[in-house]
Image (spheres, grey):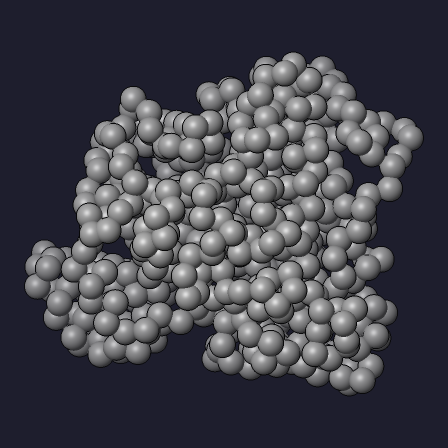
Amino acid sequence: MKDTSSISRRELLADSLLLASGLSLPTMAHADSGKSSILKTHAGKVAGVKAQGVHVFKGVPYGADTRKARFLPPQPLAAWKNTRDAERYGPACPQPGSRESMSEDCLALNVWTPALRDGGKRPVMVWFHGGEFSSGSGSSPLYDGTRLCVRGDVVVVTVNHRLNVFGHLYLGRLAGSRYASSGNVGIVDLVQALAWVRDHAELIGGDPEKIMVFGQSGGGAKIATLMAMPAAQGSFHRAATMSGQQITAAGPRGATQRARTVLDTLKIGPSDVAKLNDVPTAELVAATRANDPSMVGRSVYFGPVLDHLALPRHPFYPDAPPLAADIPMIIGNTLDETRAFLGNEPGVHELTWEELPERLLPQLHVDIQPESVIAEYRKWYPKSSATEVFFAATTAGRSWRGAVIEAELRAQQGSPVYAYQLNYRSPLENGRFGAMHGMDIPLVFDNVSQPGSLAGKDSNAQKAAEQMSEAFIAFARTGKPAHGGIPAWRPYELPERATMVFDVRSELVNDPRGEERKLFAQVPYIQRGTY
């Protein structure tokens, strides 16, 4: 099923901006075809390619077809006899607006590795894509692992899993104990994917004791959630989140409300939940467009659920998850996060000071007098325009808060944590994109020239990419993001709050934007979608 009538959050972060730039976003990037490469997985052989010195396997299944077990934990994969083709990405989970191939048979991953079965003991970097918990896939050209493999002698894995209604429809209170974990099966899929990586690490040239998870936006939120899940304990050894946090999960009341909204849209009564198994895939996807019962102006939110089974506690409330206390972690954000979400709002680049309060109030996601916020920003940054204050304040109030909370809780726990802020500003369209949400993806993957990158392709973009990608490679290898191309990167500790500010020339800064942090700390933070 394909539908282009709606635009997902993930598309807003990249696709719409690319189209505005006159660029296009293909659904797949394929390396120059090389000779065939064979990987013998525990379920059977797959045939990929070797190109540019890297073995590439795409669409490798790690679980059974989820259509046969809707809303239930992932099932084991049946073995096969004939060699399967692994030269093309597998389908994405069904979702509104995607131009990719989609199917409920979506539990597949992609592997890039410099060598097979050579005892190389390389770090394995496992990427979880963004798009909240509702959209996206591991198949974007920006996630191509070739350059990371070559640069760092590492293994890269990207993952597809269940999303939206397929991964997070909480039926535990409507359909009984069989569906007790239905609100989290999309995350349980990732646990199964990590088990596949662990079990195959040596076959793909990696080290099963050096598995790093990293992800941006929703991908980071998935990682924060995994850190509080007992089933995921021991499945990864380093974690890096990029503009993606998950402080709290949805409670059973809110998650059940949303499930009822989906059922009402499908005209299925609470006593007939079993009929969901007969609903065509396209109709389930269409039901995700229903209005959310708690949040005005958006479709149904899907995300992790506090079910006291798969997820027995909130990810980062009231403290950092003890299960993951020993896992080194990077927590990062970008300076201009909200330019990705709000940069196409009518008139936003021509805002006047008179217009700013009413434009700011609904976009802060916290209830605070906008006039007070504006007065403080004009005092701190007297040369900033109303538009610049709009993006700075909305970033600090809604997109940065979770990162600060997670870093502080980890520091209070005495757990190893490193913070970064991306200040590198894209030169495209006279700097309109700034250092927006998602700008760190092509830099971390060293993919500034890939289709979909808004980082620019000049020497400055490459310098920023070299610094960020080398830091992530070093972190995967040692648990510390230090390398010779950046200043010494100290852990984030209180009260100093040491933060690596990545740019063409990076620097370590204590408590960057500290006044902004203190301002918004005066009002409560509530994770959107979890109430």
Rendering quarter of residue 513 = bottom left
> Looking at the image, is 90 positioned above or below residue 252?
above
Q: Residue at x 33, y 29 (%)?
A: 482
Quarter of the image that includes the N terminus? bottom right
Q: Is residue 249 left or right of residue 27?
A: left
Q: Is residue 104 left or right of residue 201?
A: right
Q: Position of residue 313 (x, y in %)?
A: 53, 65
Q: Is residue 151 left or right of residue 183?
A: left
Instruction: Give the answer, above or below, for where 409 lies relative to 31.
Output: below
- Work out whether residue 153 can be spotted: yes
Q: On the picture, is 287 further left or further right than 410?
A: right
Can the viewer see residue 145? no
In x, y percent, where is residue 231?
64, 52
427 or 87: nearer the viewer: 87
Asked where in the image residue 43 lies, by quadrant, the reply is: top right
Q: Nearer the viewer, residue 451 or 364?
A: 364
The residue sitting at 51% across, 52% down in the picture is 323
User: Number of numbered discs present?
Assistant: 0
Q: In which quarter of the view is residue 169 placed?
A: bottom right
Q: Residue at x 61, y 30 (%)?
A: 208
Q: Residue at x 40, y 51 (%)?
A: 243
